[in-house]
Amino acid sequence: MTPLADSQILGHFGPYGGRFVPEALIAALDELTLAHETALNDPAFQKELADLHRTYTGRPSIITEAKRFAEHAGGARILLKREDLNHTGSHKINNVLGQALLTKRMGKKRIIAETGAGQHGVAAATAAALMGLECVVYMGEEDTKRQSLNVARMKLLGAEVIPVTQGSKTLKDAINEAMRDWVTNVETTHYLLGTVAGPHPFPTMVRDFHRIIGVEAREQCLDLVGRLPDAVLACVGGGSNAIGIFHPFLEDKSVRLIGLEAGGKGIESGLHAATISGGTPGVLHGTRSYVLQDENGQTVESHSISAGLDYPGVGPEHAYLHDIGRAEYRAITDDEAMYAFSLLSKTEGIIPAIETAHALAGAMQVGNELGADAVLLINLSGRGDKDVQTAAAYFGIPL
Amino acid sequence: MSTPLDDLFVNTRKENRAALIGFLPAGFPTQPRSISTLTAMIQGGCDAIEIGFPYSDPVMDGPIIQAASDQSLKQRTGSREVFATVKAIAPLAPTVVMTYWNPIERYGVTKFLESMKENGGSGAITPDLTIEESSHWIEETQRLESNRIFVVAPSTSDDRLKKVAEASTGFIYAASLMGVTGTRASVSTGAQTLVDRIRRITDKPVAVGLGVSTPEQAHEVAQYADGVIVGSAFIRLIQESKSEEEGISKVKNLAHALAQSMKRS
Ligand SMILES: Cc1ncc(COP(=O)(O)O)c(C=O)c1O
């Protein structure tokens, strides 16, 4: 039991979380909550998931110490938790396999998912193929153009990709459209949400499926260094990879937890996706958390070079960890992230996802602040193959 | 205390008919035209009005209301315009605001209800506010004598129906089907089943919405419900009209035909 358990009644994290959804979804959310809680305590489910992770995902993921990169981070020891080496190239598969197994347990045959960069869509399509489920992925029309390679990947995996033409035509609108589909088809369909946002039980359930990252990494760090890290860092879009690595460290008060949000062109510019650093409390997509919004409560469009962080909301547990001071959140600009992206590629031979590059830029800051005695654990949430086009354009490399 | 909306249902029950409730987003198609359109809806025969607070992420709405909300938001419709509309319409017919939760939370629950009262509105319909999240809302609507209208769905369990019915005042909004707003070829049979289930729990008024667009459908629903809610059908007429006059006259005609079908036969 964590000390947070009390505040989690009905999926609340202090004043955050909860359920702000049409009544039509309540029965399905209750069913899902029950399925999740039952599965948590069911050794057969846990074994099935663990076996899949061992034989399909490629878990446990390794730790790589980044010694040359560390020279640019104040000489601190830099440990990279390699979620990029998972099947499909990011942490997203941890959650997707868990929810796909729950879908089968609930007797549903169809999953729907939203995707921004396409990473969650690809992971969902992969799990659907593996388990024989029908899969529909909603993706903003803008994003289908920016990430055409991932659209093709999803189609190759047998999924249907529906471009969303409403609103800003990006991730937030893809979520709206997925929720409309879910309200209409809830009896046969599971909404496989890709991050720790949305109505209860999603923030708790998706976190539980990603905790494996932190559980493994804590053990691996103790083995390698003989002590806990001074800080754990991760990028924060909706916040799933961050909460996955943070959560097992919550009780370790000596360990700083640092989330790196997308600062875009700088918070002052208004063109960013740093929801905690630059937003205010509000309700979006079924949960209360920080939101980028105007004075009428209308959601403001976010901006980031990284499609996976380009979201005007954030998971409610992060809002709570921020308010109680257990975790810190900083904004990293597009340029800072791209510098770290290039640096890791050239010093370690690892091309990270641009999302992840925000965490690496944060590690450079924190390493320089804490100095050579510090040990930093960074969640390398994904690989950069999907970002080659964006990065080439940014650095002026002709394709 | 009772609001104009409460009084309406007392009367329609005496008259053995259903009340016709018309919906339009504030600021659609423009702020002045939304007021002239709502006025035409009332002149045609709407007994009560739901003014929509347009919202950037309307997950319960189908393409027609989405497009109308977008058009309204592009003109920067906000709380000021919503309450100006309430002020203009409430003297003509009982008026409520239909809004997703975040605009209320952002404006402030107490301030929202005070503005509602000042401008003569009866209360609010809150389709994404679950009863679990509504303790403060219930306290404040109680204190400021405002109707709070929750929405229930065919999938709502009897246990929850009880709780939601208990918490609702004015009327209970029964969503006729599992889905989003829009016009439909027929009214789902689930609507009557749901209303029957609510009747077994409470004698509070029940109004049916989602997918009602024609006088025939409205007549069918009027046989068993206290209120019939029509939105997308009005909006579509305005979207299809070439001039303001054409829109107003079509809206008035539809309201008239719908009002004729509120009788119980
Ligand atoms: C590699 C990678 N990291 C991080 C994220 C951001 O999501 P979250 O904050 O939920 O981990 C994404 C989302 O697409 C991603 O692909």
Image (cartoon, rainbow, N blue to C red):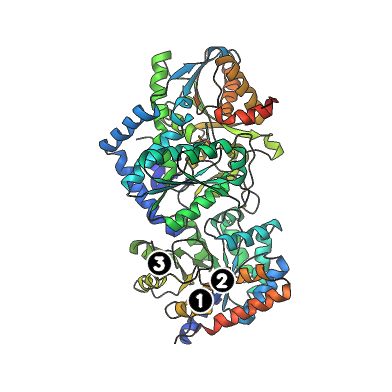
Say if A47 sits above or below B198 in the image: above
Residue sitting at x 67%, y 59%: B71
Can you give x and y, in whole percent of width and height, for residue B144 in the image?
A: 54, 66
The CA distance from mark 2 to mark 1 is: 9 Å
Say if A53 sits above or below B20 in the image: above
Residue sitting at x 45%, y 51%: A19
Q: CB of residue at label 1: within 8 Å of ligand 1?
A: no
Can you give x and y, in whole percent of width and height, for residue A276 in the image?
A: 58, 38
Q: Nearer the viewer, residue A286 or B259?
A: B259
Can you give x and y, in whole percent of width and height, for residue A384 in the image?
A: 56, 27
**Discs 2 and 1 carry the same chain letter:** yes
Marks 2 and 1 in Cβ contact (< 8 Å): yes
Left or right side of A316 for A6: left
For disc 2, the neighbor class at 10 Å (few under 14, some 14 to 19, many from 20) is many
* Between discs 2 and 1, the one toward the N terminus: 1
Residue sitting at x 42%, y 18%: A221
Q: Which residue is mark 2?
A: B122
Q: Which residue is mark 3?
A: B166
Name the chain under label 1.
B
Say if A213 sits above or below A268 in the image: above
What amino acid is at disc 1? Asp
The CA distance from mark 3 to mark 2 is: 18 Å
Query: In this view of the protein, can residue B240 be seen by the observer?
Result: yes
Question: Which mark, residue B23?
Answer: none
* Between discs 3 and 2, the one toward the N terminus: 2
Question: Which mark, residue B6?
Answer: 1
What amino acid is at disc 3? Glu
